[in-house]
Image (spheres, grey):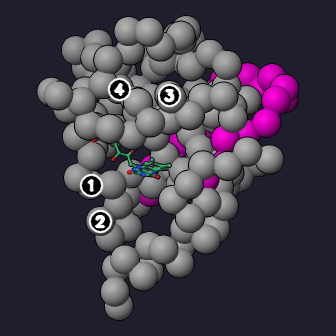
Amino acid sequence: MDTVTFRNACGQFATGVTVITTIGPGGELIGVTANSFSSVSLAPPLLLFCLGRDATSFSTFQSIGHFAINVLHEDQKDDCMHFARVGDDGRKPFEGIDYETWDTGAPILSGCLANFECTTENIHDAGDHVIMVGRVNRMRAEGEGKPLIFHAGKFHQI
Ligand SMILES: Cc1cc2nc3c(=O)[nH]c(=O)nc-3n(C[C@H](O)[C@H](O)[C@H](O)COP(=O)(O)O)c2cc1C
């Protein structure tokens, strides 16, 4: 099967956009744009995202045991693009990014529609990605505003 055709077909499914964050063992802050977010279970409260094995942050997410999911507001396209690029040293600066920290130190981005702080529950092999399942320990949902939408490689507002 042609990979590009497959990717384009999958891209017909419209999604919101998240930035997944964590903090490395040396205190380095990490953020990755991801649209592969899904809710999984209400009791216990479980969420997932899929992480590419070639991500520079892969080994940190695999070993650190926690992460945060930040659901982007329609005004946060710049944050989306910032965390979608590979930084010069494999990391992206958090200078100029407005955030706070809760219990784990993972950045909780300001202005999001929702934020979830999770403990890693499972990591499942899935081809060239892994499925990261997180158990939500703390969350905030402002419920104000509209989401950033991603469809067919473009951003949209609803
Ligand atoms: C809209 C959008 C959605 C993305 N979704 C994912 C995703 O679900 N999983 C993933 O691994 N990468 C995804 N990416 C690509 C990563 O954000 C990108 O590869 C990033 O550089 C990875 O960070 P790292 O290499 O610093 O770890 C997405 C990019 C964009 C623009």
Q: Which residue is mark 2?
A: 128
SS for callout 3? helix
Residue positioned 29% across, 13% down in the render: 27
User: Callout 4: few (<14), some (14-19), or many (20+) C-alpha neighbours within 10 Å?
Assistant: many
Assess whether residue 69 is covered by the magenta stretch: no
Q: Which residue is mark 3?
A: 79
Whether residues under marks 4 and 3 lie with C-beta atoms below 8 angstroms apart, the answer is no
- Please state the extent of the stretch shown in magenta in the rendering: 131-150
Amino acid type, label 2: Asp
Residue positioned 15% across, 27% down in the render: 89
Tell me the CA gap for discs 3 and 2.
Answer: 25 Å
| Mark 4 residue CB less than 8 A from any atom of ligand 1 | yes
| Mark 3 residue CB less than 8 A from any atom of ligand 1 | no
Amino acid type, label 4: Ile
Please name which of the two marks, 3 or 2, marks the residue nearer to the observer. Answer: 3
Q: Residue furthest bottom?
A: 1
